[in-house]
Each structure stands twice: as structure tokens, then as C-alpha cells.
Amino acid sequence: MAPKYPYELDVFTVPHSRMKALVQQYCEMLTLTNFSSACEVMQLLKQLGTTFNEFKEHETIENKYIMQKLQHKLQQLSITNNVVCNCHKDYKLSQMLQLLEDGLSKCSKTDQDRLNYGLKLRMALDDFTKDFIPHMQEEEEILQPLLVEHFTYEELKEIQTQVIDHHTHL
Ligand code: FEO
């Protein structure tokens, strides 16, 4: 399917491709990890730590270069939009980062501790993924059209450049 918006105006598709690839990666890694092995759990936690810090970075970039500008623009036009206001409010990133931190201290404990932690981690990751994928879809399907509607071509092109430039790993 052809992209809906020109590349230079599309602020979400490229970063979200990366985020979706990371989701796919941790889902696969989770199925392969043996939680009886301290070494494997440690490896998984390190990878998840890197991934979730990248998600956090993605959120920070969106807040700074997209959401604040869009909110400001809508306020100027006296338009209220709850999706923009609440976009990152209800997010489970901080809880996930805390859970990963807790896991590091459990790695060196008993097999049972790691197995229990593994169950908790799987449930939390499932929960996170169930929110994160629709969250990205919402940004693509609701916020991107709002950006196109309310910013000029040049303004949005500049926002897109900033967003892509700050996702340095893309
Ligand atoms: Fe693009 Fe808010 O995740």
C-alpha cells in the first residue's frame, strides 16, 4: 500500500517501524529465554533495558517536537483534543523500567525467584504491548492528520526533520 502522507511530512511511520521491530524482537527473545538460567535472564534484562530506554527516548522526542507544538497550535485555534492531551499520560513505560530494574536484583537469587519474576515479566510485557501497538496506531491515524491539517507544509517538514534527526539509531 502506498504511504498516505509524503515522507517529508510523515512524523510517525519511520520511528514506529523501529519501535515495532523492537517489540517483535523482545517477543521472540522472551519465548527463547530459560528463566532458570541467571545468565539468560541477565541477557534478556539488559536487552529489554536498552529497548525500553529507546521507547522512553521516542516518547520524549514526540513530546518535545510533536505533542507540545500540536497542543500549542490547537490552543491558538481554540480546539480541544483529548487524544493530544492524554497521548502519553496513561503510559506504562516507567512501570516497565522499574520492573526491569527489580529483575536485575533477582537474577542472582534462586531458580524459583527467577521463574516467578519471569511470569510477572511476561504478563507486564503482554500488557505493555497490548497498549503500545494501538497507541502508535492512534498517533498515526489521529495525530498525523491533525498535523497535516493544522501546520503548513514547511512547518511540518521541519518537525519531521527534527523527529527523524533525534531518532539517531534509525
Ligand atoms: Fe510513537 Fe507515543 O509512541
Image (cartoon, grey):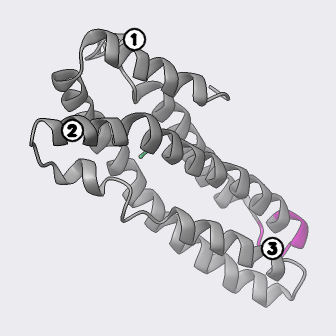
Which residue matches tag 1? 8
Q: In which quadrant of the rendered view does residue 7 lie?
A: top left
Mark 1 and mark 3 residues within 8 Å of each other at the beta carbon: no
Which residue matches tag 3? 104
Which quadrant of the figure contains the N terminus?
top left
Instruction: Tell me the crowding category of disc 3: few under 14, some 14 to 19, or many 20 or more residues within 10 angstroms, Cα based.
Output: some
Q: CA distance from mark 3 to mark 2?
A: 38 Å
Residue 118: percent from the left, percent from the top?
A: 67, 76
Q: Is residue 52 above or below residue 22?
A: below
Q: Nearer the viewer, residue 54 or 113?
A: 54
Q: Nearer the viewer, mark 1 or mark 3?
A: 1
User: Which residue, as the protein is rendered here, is positioned at the far left?
Assistant: 78
Residue 76: percent from the left, percent from the top?
A: 16, 37
Q: Is residue 169 left or right of residue 75?
A: right
Residue type highlighted by circle 3: Leu
Which quadrant of the figure contains the C terminus?
top right
Residue at disc 3, secondary structure: helix
Residue type highlighted by circle 2: Ile
Instruction: Tell me the crowding category of disc 2: few under 14, some 14 to 19, or many 20 or more residues within 10 angstroms, Cα based.
Output: few
Ligand 1's quadrant is top left
The mark nearer the N terminus, 1 or 2, is 1
Q: Which residues are magenta?
A: 34-40
